[in-house]
Amino acid sequence: MTDAPDPDDIAAATRDIADVAAVEIITTAAVHLMSAAAVKCGLAQDGPDGRGEDLRDLDEARKLITALAGLVVTAAPDLGNEHARSLRDGLRTLQLAFREASLYPDAPGEGPGERLTGPVS
């Protein structure tokens, strides 16, 4: 027995992804980044304290929010106003949550992703 992928499975997966619109793939990637950043900002409800604060890792959150900002800012013109607005709102919410969770908040314009989005307050 080998663990080599079945060529038929690969072909089926390729056909499946070909049927998905780019806006859906971009939005899905953004939602995954948002979800991970929310957990790393301590917004999860799953921690032993019931608030997720012990899951907080602001260094990791900063990386995720910056990646999300890059995706949202560069993809927004191609996503259409409805999709882009929702993603920008989610990004801004995470940037504000990061600022609130930080013991020593970054200067305006220096927070995660703010060099791409501008300062949030």
Image (cartoon, rainbow, N blue to C red):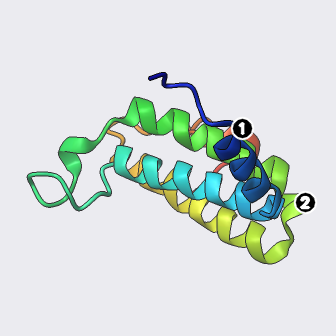
Residue at horizontal 55%, vertical 48%?
A: 33
Label 1 sits on a secondary structure element that is helix
Separation of marks 2 and 1 at Cα, in angstroms: 18 Å
Residue at horizontal 63%, vertical 67%?
A: 89
Residue at horizontal 53%, vertical 39%?
A: 64
Q: Residues within 10 Å of mark 1 (few under 14, many from 20)?
A: some
From what the image shows, is residue 9 above or below residue 76?
above
Q: Which residue is mark 1?
A: 115
Label 2 sits on a secondary structure element that is helix
Q: Which residue is mark 2?
A: 77
Quadrant of res 9: top right
From what the image shows, is residue 115 above or below residue 16?
above
From what the image shows, is residue 81 above or below residue 118?
below
Q: Is residue 44 visible?
A: yes
Residue 23 percent across, percent down from the top left: 79, 63
Residue 13 percent across, percent down from the top left: 69, 50
Q: Nearer the viewer, residue 45 or 93?
A: 45
What is the three-letter code of the residue carrying label 2? Answer: Pro
Q: Is residue 106 visible?
A: no
Residue at horizontal 33%, vertical 35%?
A: 57
Residue 79 percent across, percent down from the top left: 84, 64
